[in-house]
Image: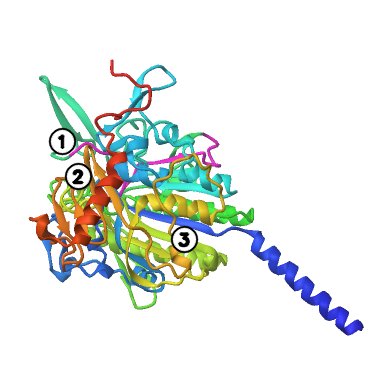
Amino acid sequence: MKSVMKKGLYLFVVFLFSLSAQAKKKPNVIIFFADDISAREFPMYGSSVWSDPKGHNTDNPEFRAKTPVMDRLADEGVTVKTAWAATVCNPSRAMMMTGRYAHIHKWWHNKDKGWYINEKGKKATWPPYESSPMLIGHIAQKAGYGTYWAGKTQMAGDLTKYGFDEGCFTPGSLSDKDNPYTDFKHKMLKKDGKKILLNADTGKPCKTYMQHGWYWYPHVRLMNDPVSGKKFSWWPNTKESKASFGINTYGPDVELDFVFNFMDRQEKKDKPFFIYHTSHLGHDAFDWFKPDSKCKWPGAPIVKWDGKKYTRTKPQVTGDNGVYDTHGTITSSGIHNHINYIDYQISLYLKKLKEMGEDQNTIIIIAADNGTSGYGKASPDRQKGCHVPFIVYAPGFDFTKSGMQDVLLNIADVWPTLAEVMQVDVPDDYEVNGESFWGWLTTDKQEHRDWIYAYRKEMQLVRGKNVMKDGYGKWWDVSEQPDDLIDFQKIMDWEKESKTNRKEKEQLLKTIKPFDKHETEHDAPGYKKR
């Protein structure tokens, strides 16, 4: 009898321990949201063409990205064949953060956003936290997560109101004029009534768009940094960081260092973390090391894969005032080298998670905000602007799918998915346009959703399983994927199309009609043009 009681007690203790372990911590979530990268640039999508260093189409293997780490994640996790964002940065980031489309948040295009009257009584861009009080960061905070935002912001208003405890921003913001630590920035000079863009590093005019450096010798601004104790502060901010900061400092490295520091601090608190890493990698930029260069993407640190791990060459750039020697320690120009560096950074995330013992309790989502500059960015043509890579990797969870999946997915779907995973109840009257894909990932459900949607100003793009309408109002047969992921057959005569295709067209037009508010409800409710 005592033996039976001991065995029963042992099983009860094991049961309680199991419950305790399950209730101990919710899964960590990392979103790596890359910048201006079409799905075709990632090798696992199998496109017959990609972008060369000048942004032109090429099939030259020299300019093909190599992504052994993400290839494995794409194979062991889930890769979505057709994921759509909006056609350009700002609307896509608003879509990601809100789980909603522009008819609600009013971010129609980069330079076409809804207005409102702010707390100072002035006309201003309507921030997503005003239109959508439950942003992706707020969802995580409500669920008890520590939240961190790293990289590019591109958000209006007060960045502390987006639901993130801390942040490390490489903003490139033209309003940040008080950074004392780097002169990799542009200044606007007015002379004889004309505006002249100057390279602050050389003092010479340059032909590009105005920007502050976010790659080499970067502008780094911290939010709620525990070292400074300030709401916002410039980095470097310690004796050690000031001593090491210089032209060999690479912005994406700084972001990751701060992310890892935050993860360590969350681990000590035994608290789950949500990392929203909006990397600049993929975005074209002025090359401060080669100010006369006509290539779009500055070089990155050299990384080499030996079949098991990466080795990174330490940058040894020397020079000043626009004359620099990289001594062969950084790559040549090209978006492929940016993607290679993303792969390297993903490998560092995996290594860090394993060291922390969190690799089986973390969901990683890798995506991008819109198409590649020079090919798809801001384009309403077919799906050039909105077709982005999308990978979900979570080895500790029982996915019923793996590898490339021929389904449709919207960036807006991330929001409801995280709400479900983080176990946050969403009010029934709170409109969410995205659809959670967690059930599709973990059950026998074969399809995720029937249609996906994108927008560019007043233009609406929509795609079903068989037909697609682009921003120009042209329709395309998408029942088969072309080798270059874009050369679909144009539908010229609907009378010759199948009944299935005609019915799908009607349904798609009916579906997107409620979102067509650009002309009638362009701004925040109650705003009146003065």
User: The residue under label 3 is which amino acid type?
Assistant: Trp
Residue 226 colored in magenta in the image: yes
Where the C terminus falls, by quadrant? top left
In three-dimensional space, the C-alpha distance between marks 3 and 2, rounded to whole angstroms, equals: 50 Å
Looking at the picture, how far across and down is residue 235, in whole percent?
43, 41
Looking at the picture, how far across and down is residue 433, in whole percent?
39, 46
Looking at the picture, how far across and down is residue 479, in whole percent?
21, 65
Determine whether 84 is above or below 179 in the image: below
Determine whether 327 is above or below 7 in the image: above
User: The residue under label 1 is which amino acid type?
Assistant: Lys
* Residue 312 sits in quarter: bottom left
Question: Which residue does the numbered mark 2 point to in the structure image?
Answer: 322
Determine whether 272 is above or below 172 in the image: below
The region drawn magenta spans 209-230
Q: Observer-nearest residue: 220 or 22? A: 22
Question: Which residue does the numbered mark 1 point to in the structure image?
Answer: 204
- Circles 1 and 2, Cβ within 8 Å, touching? The answer is yes
Counting other residues with Cα less than 10 Å from the Cα at mark 1, is it few (<14), some (14-19), or many (20 or more)?
some
Secondary structure beneath dot 3 equals helix
Question: Which residue does the numbered mark 3 point to in the structure image?
Answer: 438
Residue 304 colored in magenta in the image: no
At 30% across and 55% down in the image, what residue appears?
A: 451
- Circles 3 and 2, Cβ within 8 Å, touching? The answer is no
